[in-house]
Image (cartoon, rainbow, N blue to C red):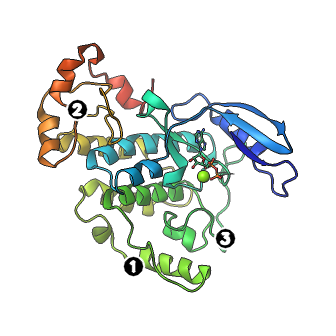
Amino acid sequence: MKTEPANSRNPQLKGEYDLYRWLAGANGIPNVHYLGVHHGCNTLVMDLLGKSLEDLFQARGQRFSLKTVLMLADQLVARLEHVHNKDYLHRDIKSENFMVGHGSRNDIVYIIDFGLSKKYVDSRKRHMAYREGRDLIGTPRFVSINTHLGKEQSRRDDMEALGHMMLYFLRGSLPWQGLPAPTVKEKYAKIRDKKINTSLQELCHGFPIEFATYMKYVRALRFEERPDYAYLRNMFRSALERHGFQYDYVFDWVTGPGRRVSRTSRASKASRSRGRRAPSSSRAQRTPSRARPRSGGRRQNGGRR
Ligand SMILES: Nc1ncnc2c1ncn2[C@@H]1O[C@H](COP(=O)(O)OP(=O)(O)O)[C@@H](O)[C@H]1O
Ligand SMILES: [Mg+2]
């Protein structure tokens, strides 16, 4: 349930409710059930979700495994693809605004919080105009460099913020976190300068080349350009395979039997050698009823079920 005072000067919930309805029906979009006024508050009722990626990240000591981030990448890019295909930018990409499903659905990543979203094409699918001098909208830690520079946001900026978030998960923090500054304005300027001055090589050091490729690709997109979501997802999937991981939906926070059981011991061995958890073959043997053949369809759909 999300509420705001009914007499709020800047009411958002109706717009958010409408947007959830507009986006409904795809994977990782929570269903909304009700919008009304209760005790002087606009009240939005939606599916109860599990924890946010930020909660899970904190609970794991501020680090996600490579396998988890590579599997996450597939769903995260798919979520943005859906929102963008439905004519909207999210504009507040951050770890608090992605949540996993409740209970056993904790291997599905949901995108939430459309309070800052904006339609970027008109009814005839014409892209909005390029502008400069915009205020920073979003979360400074994650926003794109162009957003810092006051450029109107477009699809590329959601994608870049997503890249920053994935690197945050892998690295544990971003180089522009915790910079001291006397005022908010100076702090934002320091974050901007550090983002500009941190090379992708430095930012992505120690992680598969695909993360640097992703960042380079999204930062080079033109204002109106459609990101090639399929290319990016395929790239992360190949990285997953190359590192010997199974795409089995066993994220760092998933305990108990995984949804799909590894058919070979390759993933387990590879993960063990990196000191990370993988679906063990003993677990597979204990829970044969959970065993399911790998299906290509699911992989294509970023967590569809
Ligand atoms: N459907 C939900 N189920 C459970 N918790 C939720 C749900 N939606 C939001 N939350 C929690 O509430 C927080 C704030 O919700 P959000 O929609 O992001 O509002 P805000 O605009 O205040 O950031 C989220 O980060 C999450 O922790
Ligand atoms: Mg939020």
Q: Which residue is mark 1?
A: 197
In this rendering, would 276 be left or right of 115? left
Q: Which residue is mark 3?
A: 134
Q: CA separation, marks 1 and 2?
A: 40 Å
- The nearer-to-camera label among 1 and 2 is 2
Disc 2 CB within 8 Å of nearest ligand 1 atom:
no
Task: Answer with mark 1 or mark 2, whichever residue precedes in sequence.
Answer: 1
What is the quadrant of the C terminus in the image?
Answer: top left
* Amino acid, disc 1: Asn
Q: Which residue is mark 2?
A: 279
* Amino acid, disc 2: Pro
Q: Is residue 263 visible?
A: no
Disc 1 CB within 8 Å of nearest ligand 2 atom:
no
Q: Secondary structure at mark 2?
A: loop
Q: Residue furthest bottom?
A: 182
Q: Give the crowd class for mark 3: few <14, some 14-19, many >=20 residues within 10 Å.
A: few
Q: Quadrant of residue 175?
A: bottom left
In this rendering, would 46 be left or right of 229? right
